[in-house]
Image (tube, rainbow, N blue to C red):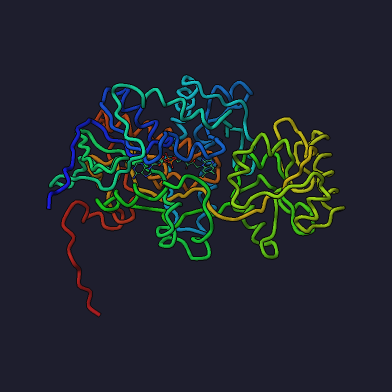
Amino acid sequence: MQQEETKSIETDVLVIGAGPAGMAAVAAARESGASVVAVEAQDRIGGNAIWSTGYVVFVDTPMQRAEGIEDDVEEFLEDAGVIADRSRGDFGVLYDEKLARIYGEESAETYRQLIERGVRFPRFIHRPKQHQLDRVAAVEDTQMFAAAYQPDFDSDEVTVFYRSSARRLLTDSDGAVVGARITTDDGTTVNVIASRGVVLCAGGYQANPDMRARYQPESRSTKPYLGIDTARGDGHLMGGAVGGDLINMTFIPSLVIVASSMLEESIAIDRQGRRFHDETGVYEDRVSAVLAQPDQWAYYVFDGVTAEKKAQYVEQMPDEAVSSETLEGLAELIGVPADQLVATVDEWNETLESGATVDPLQGRVSFPVDRRGIRTGPFFASRMVAGCSFISGGFQVTTSMQVVDVFGDPIPGLFAAGDCVGGFNPCADLGGIHIGGGLTFGRIAGHAVASGDLAKPHTTSPLSRFLPSRVGTTMEIVHVES
Ligand SMILES: Cc1cc2nc3c(=O)[nH]c(=O)nc-3n(C[C@H](O)[C@H](O)[C@H](O)COP(=O)(O)OP(=O)(O)OC[C@H]3O[C@@H](n4cnc5c(N)ncnc54)[C@H](O)[C@@H]3O)c2cc1C
């Protein structure tokens, strides 16, 4: 039988995945003068950022200074540390403060580059329960992220394989990563040989039921995920196969599945037709509030203007929304007392009209941009469902984003960024560090792999700490007498 021919191409840098991390890695590698091959499973760049609400944390930016906000890295680290610590009761957490510090120092440059590339952030999102001051910026349109980086992908120095997936990393006899085997959209197998290295930017593993089942209890692993279907954990699996040290893999935060952008204009009601929590508060608190409802019964309520303006996000909801021309009709459809639903909506509208900065009922501080109430029919109700949107597990890396093995040794030729990296994401409840982290650490990884300018590893690896004398040497088997 004739063997199918495997093609081979050569490049300086291979970037696997083109979400925020991959886009920034490609741009930085290109700017550093490298030739780049990018492989992307979807037919476009942008990854989960296109599905997202586009909130991004930036530390110490002109946007803040224009509003008289004085931010600094230490204050950011304080906030991030508090959030990471909060999760220790629920997950095994290895939080890499060195990465958080780099983020604090570098996110302003990410902001600068995004603005230069035409991305607009018209407003802050107030999150006083997570941040001491305003630093969560909302993008005007999530399509802007991809548009900002498309010119790099269209340039002569970058070869892009769309609708194509990396399947395996290729290594040399010393274990250095020298490229990857990919399957292109027409089914051809191509070995991409990357002389300077490979950057794993393939996103998370939340769309992979087998990986969810491995790392989550069944009660959580079967809960739905909202986002791109190619968050299959390919990067985690390929990097793990060559020895990369995966941490925080059980850390898959439960979230009420809803785009924050839609939420800004919605309230949540219980079976009595009453609001029962701060809809825009801390992620965990929202999940607990829904789980505490009998049969986990709860709905978001919003009006026709929101439904039209935010149609993309309404369609993304796990269950189809129901609607009626009147609030009374909506109440009947979902089975809540009509007079109470009307009273709840009236109270919400009055709060908005009053100009209050804190909602007296639930302490909510995030309101619709124009403080527009729920007033225009038809009125909609969309079931609240607890599931997940993102993960926190990924590789341990050096400060140059080089993947390390379980002994803390960097793997030659292998880099990672975004959701393929584990140490920074435990502070995810800050809201906006996934996209910001992808863009910032993707840029650092792209520059490092292209330039060869590598930092020494910092050893947060648990095994390298506990077995320091064995790092880099052959493991010995120790027999313990019983
Ligand atoms: C509904 C929703 C709302 C969100 N809102 C926010 C928000 O407001 N702020 C925030 O910070 N974060 C938000 N997030 C999270 C954020 O979007 C992601 O964490 C972020 O996009 C991760 O960036 P990334 O580049 O690491 O991965 P991704 O954006 O997931 O991109 C990875 C890319 O790799 C590709 N890929 C995967 N496997 C392969 C393979 N084998 N070969 C080739 N390509 C491959 C995928 O197709 C994808 O395009 C949200 C997520 C969701 C789902």
Determine the image quadrant of residue 368: top right
Q: Quadrant of the C terminus?
A: bottom left
Q: Is residue 102 visible?
A: no
Tell which residue pokes out farthest to the front in this image: 1
Q: Position of residue 220 (x, y in %)?
A: 52, 61
Q: Position of residue 90 (x, y in %)?
A: 52, 59
Pick the front one: 245 or 213: 213
Vertical relation: 413 (above or below) 108: below
Q: Position of residue 344 (x, y in %)?
A: 82, 48
Horizontally, residue 111 falls left or right of residue 40, namely right
Vertical relation: 54 (above or below) 214: above
Image-quarter location of ligand 1 = top left
Pick the front one: 416 or 163: 163
Vertical relation: 449 (above or below) 474: above
* Count of all numbered marks drawn on residues in the image: 0
Tell which residue pokes out farthest to the bottom in this image: 482
Could you tell me which residue is drawn at 79 percent across and 48 percent down? Answer: 361
Pick the front one: 4 or 114: 4
Q: Is residue 118 visible?
A: yes
Horizontally, residue 303 falls left or right of residue 444, namely right
Could you tell me which residue is drawn at 22 percent across and 35 percent down? Answer: 194
Horizontally, residue 410 falls left or right of residue 360, namely left
Horizontally, residue 142 falls left or right of residue 422, namely right
Q: Position of residue 378 (x, y in %)?
A: 77, 42
